[in-house]
Structures are given as C-alpha cells and as structure tokens.
C-alpha cells in the first residue's frame, strides 16, 4: 500500500506543472465569462438660472462645430470611425449642446459657428474622442474673448439600453447627460464672474472684432499681458464714426450667422432619424462584437489548454493516455478554430457598420444674400460660405470707411 501511494504521489508531482497551467488557462476563460453590465436611464439634470438674469450679465456663446477627431482616431475593430458619420456628428453635437445652453436660461445668444471668431464673448470648442452608439466621449474647451480659458475637460457617458427602446422611448438625446454637464460647468463658471468682469469681457469682444477689420484704428484700445490675456487700455468715444460702422458690420455678421442656425437646425432634423437608427444598430453591434470577442477569447484559451493537455498526455507513453492525448489535441484545435471563426464574424459586423456610416453625408445648399448694390451667391460647405461672407463684410467696411475718409 505504501509503495502504491508513493508511486501515485510521484505521478502527481510529475504532472504538477501541467495541471497548474491548465487550471490557470481555464480560470482565465471562466473569469472572462464573468462580466456585469449596469445600465441606467438616469443622467445629470440641467441646472437652470435661478432668477431672471439682468441683460447686462448675459454673455453670447459661440459653439464651434466639433472636431470629428479623424486625425487621431485609429480605424479598426476596436475603434469604429467613419469619416462621413463623424463629420455629421460634429454638427449634431454642437447643435445639441447649444440647445442645452439655451434651455439653462443663463446666456445671451447661443450660436453654432463653423470656425472660431473674434466677436464672441464665450467660445466652446470640442473634439469627438469616441462615438459608437454605446459610448460617447468628447474633449471640451471653453474660452472667453479675453483669452482666458475657463476649463478643458473630457466628458464621457454610456447610453442606456432604454435609450433605443422603441416600445419605451426616453426623452432627449441618448447622451443628454454630457450636454447637461457641460452646460452646468459653464454656468457655474459664469456665475462666479463679477459684473465688472462681464462688462469688460463684452467690451473686449467688440474691440477684438473692430480690430480684425481695422487694426490701425483699434489696436491702441487693447493690450495683451505675458500670458496672452487681453485687457482694455482705453475706449473709443460712443459717437466715434469708425466704431459706429464696426457695430453695423458686426450686426450684419450676426444676422448671417443667425441664418446659419437655420441650416444647422435643418441639417440636424434631417439626420436625426437615420442617425438614431445608426446609433441603435451600432449599440447592438458593439455589444455583439464584445460578446463574440469574449467567446472567441474563451474558446481560444480553452482550446490552447486542451492542446497542451493533449500533448502532455500523448507523450506519457501509455496507449490509453496517448489516445486520449490525440483526442485532446483534436478537440483543442476545434476550439481554436471556433475562436478564430468568431473573430471573423466580428469583422463582418465592423463592415456592416462601415456601410451604415458611409451613407451619412452632409450637403449644403448655396445661399443668396441681397446687398444694397448687388446680389451675392455663397456656395460650398458652410465653412466656405462663412469665409466668403467675411470677405464681403470686409469689402463693405472698407468701402464705407473710404467714403467716410473722403468726406472728412
């Protein structure tokens, strides 16, 4: 009995490393199966201005359509990035954020703009980091016309399953919490500004706009410190003819940007249905891909464990052990192949998402602008149209300024 137990003990010792490897591999596979997902329909509520804010404390906001993030994104299985879709999202996110800011009742005019401008009190810029229907991550920077950065933050949120439930649809955007958090952070910062700071900020906005059209006339009113922050050095007289003309030009600029709001609103409304469909399908595709990869990983791990065990058994020498080893190797090979097949299925889902993303494209209709002496047609993208408009404004300003100097 003693010898038998001794021989059995030696046999166990010889296979100890093999058993340990198998246990580790199987524990990894089982651990990969244990995943828990929590979804909730709750999101950060929007903070409202608690009182009727005086007009002199209102600040205008310009939200630059977001950077689609195509230059830093890596397209692949893990990163579902489609250029046409991202371009559309860059406008959609800006418009949705503008709606949240307007709903907070704490701001003046809130406009979506195609590029950074000099006559806006507060400018919001952002970059899309991730957007796949399940998760939205954006980087947001808020700066005022002084050049003072309010904050730079990354916001991320996961959509609730109920966000895409057609039987029980939820109100608002699937990622409304992100927009509310940005709006809340901005409102909290603005509420800390004194009346004097807000008045100065609004004046700096006007002077920077004026200087962009006539540097020689308005340079002396602004100075920049070592940190690049603008400060007022002096102010022109209220009845200064040059200032009056700049203000008229600025009003025209506002009017044109207001017409762009109609374009942005129409664009978002037209893309909303297919975009939400894409989000819902992408949400399911992402979940399925994750599940497929999990199963593929589990099958690959278990297949490797079976092959390792089969090789060890095949080399044991005994006929029955060798036969069992061959079966283990064959079974492990099947599990490995199954894992690779599932990865191929995941790639098919990526291709399906690519087809969906390719169908999202933005079109911009030409705009006809009636001026006093002519009719101008602006064409191309919204960015190009605005660039053309700024050139026209410069021509108008120079013509009016030239007439003024001649009369003087």
Image (cartoon, rainbow, N blue to C red):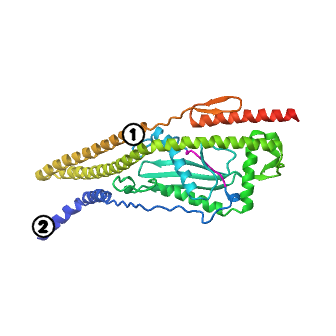
Q: In which quarter of the image is the N terminus?
A: bottom left
- Looking at the rendered image, the disc whose residue lies closer to the viewer, 2 or 1, is 1
Question: Compared with residue 184, is residue 99 higher up or lower down, i.e. above or below?
Answer: above
Secondary structure beneath dot 1 equals: helix
Would residue 77 be found to the left or right of residue 60 on screen?
left
| Magenta extent | 59-66
- Neighbor class of circle 1 (other Cα within 10 Å; few <14, some 14-19, many 20+) is many
| Front residue of this view, candidates 284 and 201 | 201
Would residue 190 be found to the left or right of residue 273 on screen?
right
Query: What residue is at 60 percent from the left and 66 percent from the top?
Result: 50
Query: What residue is at 68 percent from the left and 58 percent from the top?
Result: 55
Question: Compared with residue 23, is residue 263 higher up or lower down, i.e. above or below?
Answer: above
Q: Where is residue 122 in the image (x, y as percent from the top left)?
A: 65, 52
- Return the residue found at the far bottom: 2
The answer to if 142 sits in the magenta stretch is: no
Residue picked out by circle 1: 356
Q: Can residue 153 be seen in this view?
A: no
Q: Where is residue 95 in the image (x, y as percent from the top left)?
A: 54, 48
Q: Position of residue 88 (x, y in %)?
A: 49, 41
Q: Where is residue 348 in the image (x, y as percent from the top left)?
A: 33, 40
Residue picked out by circle 2: 4
| Front residue of this view, candidates 372 and 89 | 372
| Front residue of this view, candidates 71 and 301 | 71
Residue 16, label in figure: none
- Return the residue found at the far right: 408
Q: Which of marks 2 and 1 is nearer the N terminus?
A: 2
| Front residue of this view, candidates 193 and 404 | 404
Q: Is residue 271 visible?
A: yes
Q: How far separated are the C-alphas under marks 2 and 1?
A: 68 Å
The answer to if 64 sits in the magenta stretch is: yes
């Amino acid at each position: 009995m003693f010898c038998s137990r001794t021989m059995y003990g030696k046999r166990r010792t010889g296979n100890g490393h093999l058993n340990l490897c198998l246990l580790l591999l199987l524990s990894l596979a089982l651990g990969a199966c244990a995943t828990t997902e929590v979804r909730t329909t709750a999101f950060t509520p929007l903070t409202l201005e608690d009182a009727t804010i005086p007009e002199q404390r209102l600040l205008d906001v310009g939200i630059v359509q977001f950077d689609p993030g195509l230059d830093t994104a890596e397209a692949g299985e893990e990163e579902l990035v489609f250029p046409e879709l991202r371009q559309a999202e860059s406008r959609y996110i800006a418009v949705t954020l503008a709606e949240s800011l307007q709903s907070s009742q704490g701001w003046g005019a809130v406009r979506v703009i195609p590029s950074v401008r000099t006559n806006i009190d507060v400018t919001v810029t952002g970059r899309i980091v991730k957007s796949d229907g399940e998760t939205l991550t954006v980087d947001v920077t808020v700066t005022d016309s002084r050049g003072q950065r309010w904050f730079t933050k990354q916001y991320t949120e996961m959509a609730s399953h109920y966000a895409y439930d057609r039987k029980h649809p939820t109100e608002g955007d699937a990622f409304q919490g992100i927009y509310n958090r940005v709006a809340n952070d901005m409102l909290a910062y603005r509420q800390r500004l004194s009346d004097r700071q807000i008045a100065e900020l609004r004046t700096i906005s006007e002077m920077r706009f004026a200087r962009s059209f006539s540097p020689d006339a308005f340079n002396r009113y602004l100075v920049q410190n070592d940190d690049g922050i603008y400060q007022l050095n002096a102010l022109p007289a209220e009845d200064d003819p040059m200032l009056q003309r700049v203000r008229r030009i600025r009003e025209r600029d506002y009017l044109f940007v207001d017409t762009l709001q109609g374009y942005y609103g129409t664009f978002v409304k037209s893309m909303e249905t297919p975009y939400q469909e894409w989000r819902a399908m992408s949400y399911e595709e992402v979940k399925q891909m994750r599940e497929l990869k999990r199963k593929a990983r589990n099958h690959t791990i278990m297949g490797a464990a079976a092959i390792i065990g089969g090789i060890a058994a095949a080399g044991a020498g005994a006929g029955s052990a060798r036969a069992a080893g061959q079966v283990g190797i064959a079974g492990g090979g099947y599990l490995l192949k199954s894992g690779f097949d599932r990865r191929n299925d995941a790639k098919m889902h990526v291709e399906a998402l690519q087809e969906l993303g390719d169908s999202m494209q933005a079109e911009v209709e030409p705009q006809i602008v009636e001026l006093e002496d002519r009719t101008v047609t602006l064409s191309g993208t919204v960015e190009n149209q605005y660039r053309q408009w700024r050139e026209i404004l410069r021509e108008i300003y120079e013509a009016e300024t030239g007439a003024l100097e001649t009369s003087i």
